[in-house]
């Protein structure tokens, strides 16, 4: 599922450096001497190359190798769901939560960078469902708030005279809403933290069984 994540300034550089490190580790892994096919017959060489591809795939599955933005985001988002206690089955969210546009209670500001990525459909759906059902009461109250205060503009922090308190009511309700965008951001940062600083040095790959 395609996802666009709004992020704080500097996140793109951190991600790029981290992915460069992970790709270097992947290169070291596939160039390990244990995968050398020099002097082997064609069938033997094909078998070794197949095992090498399998080794890389298993390293990715074990989260030992996070060499793409999509994998970094999926790793971080899964861990964020676990940290929130949301990594469990949820009812499917209603259709109004699936369409384009902003969720009620979405906050503005502080996120000048964007990254476009793809997440597994089941993971992205779980995030959307969890956000909706943990925020459902606040979302319903915000929709009623909009009906009650149609002239108040919370994004502009503006209210007609006599309705200033409505903005504070809105802020309290919005604080109870968790949007998917918040989980995407937290997941990206958690993925960066889990994979380590780009300046960290990991032990060299020792080959199969090393």
Image: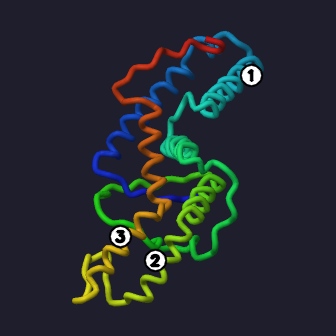
- Mark closer to the observer (1, 2): 2
Residue beneath the point at 68% across and 59% down: 90
Q: Residues within 10 Å of mark 1 (few under 14, many from 20)?
A: few
> Which residue lies under the disc numbered 2?
142
Q: Nearer the viewer, residue 203 or 190?
A: 190
- Mark closer to the observer (3, 1): 3
Under tag 1, what secondary structure? Answer: helix
Q: Residue furthest right?
A: 43
Residue beneath the point at 56% across and 12% down: 206
Under tag 2, what secondary structure? Answer: helix
Q: Quadrant of the N terminus?
A: bottom right
Q: Position of residue 130 (x, y in %)?
A: 59, 59
Q: Residues within 10 Å of mark 2 (few under 14, many from 20)?
A: many
In three-dimensional space, the C-alpha distance between marks 1 and 2, rounded to whole angstroms, equals 60 Å
> Which residue lies under the disc numbered 3?
171
Residue beneath the point at 65% across and 24% down: 52
Q: Quadrant of the C terminus?
A: top right
Relative placement, left or right, of 88 versus 152 is right
Q: Position of residue 85 (x, y in %)?
A: 59, 47
Under tag 3, what secondary structure? Answer: helix
In three-dimensional space, the C-alpha distance between marks 2 and 3, rounded to whole angstroms, equals 10 Å
Q: Position of residue 13 (x, y in %)?
A: 32, 42
In the displayed structure, 201 sits above or below 141; it is above
Q: Earlier in the sequence, mark 3 or mark 1?
A: 1
In the displayed structure, 78 sits above or below 193; it is below
> Which residue lies under the disc numbered 1?
47
């Amino acid at each position: 599922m395609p996802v666009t994540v709004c992020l704080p300034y500097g996140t793109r550089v951190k991600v790029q450096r981290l992915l460069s490190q992970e790709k270097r580790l992947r290169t070291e892994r596939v160039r390990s001497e244990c995968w050398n096919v020099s002097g082997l017959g064609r069938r033997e060489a094909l078998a070794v190359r197949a095992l090498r591809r399998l080794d890389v795939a298993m390293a990715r599955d074990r989260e030992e190798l996070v060499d793409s933005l999509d994998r970094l985001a999926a790793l971080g988002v899964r861990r964020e769901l676990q940290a929130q206690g949301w990594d469990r089955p949820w009812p499917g969210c209603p259709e109004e939560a699936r369409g384009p546009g902003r969720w009620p209670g979405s906050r503005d500001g502080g996120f000048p960078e964007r990254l476009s990525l793809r997440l597994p459909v089941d993971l992205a759906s779980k995030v959307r469902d969890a956000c909706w059902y943990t925020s459902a009461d606040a979302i319903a109250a915000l929709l009623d708030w909009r009906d009650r205060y149609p002239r108040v503009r919370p994004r502009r922090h503006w209210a007609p005279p006599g309705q200033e308190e409505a903005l504070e009511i809105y802020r309290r309700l919005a604080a109870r809403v968790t949007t998917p965008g918040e989980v995407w951001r937290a997941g990206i940062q958690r993925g960066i933290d889990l994979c380590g600083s780009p300046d960290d040095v990991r032990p060299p790959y020792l080959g199969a069984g090393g």
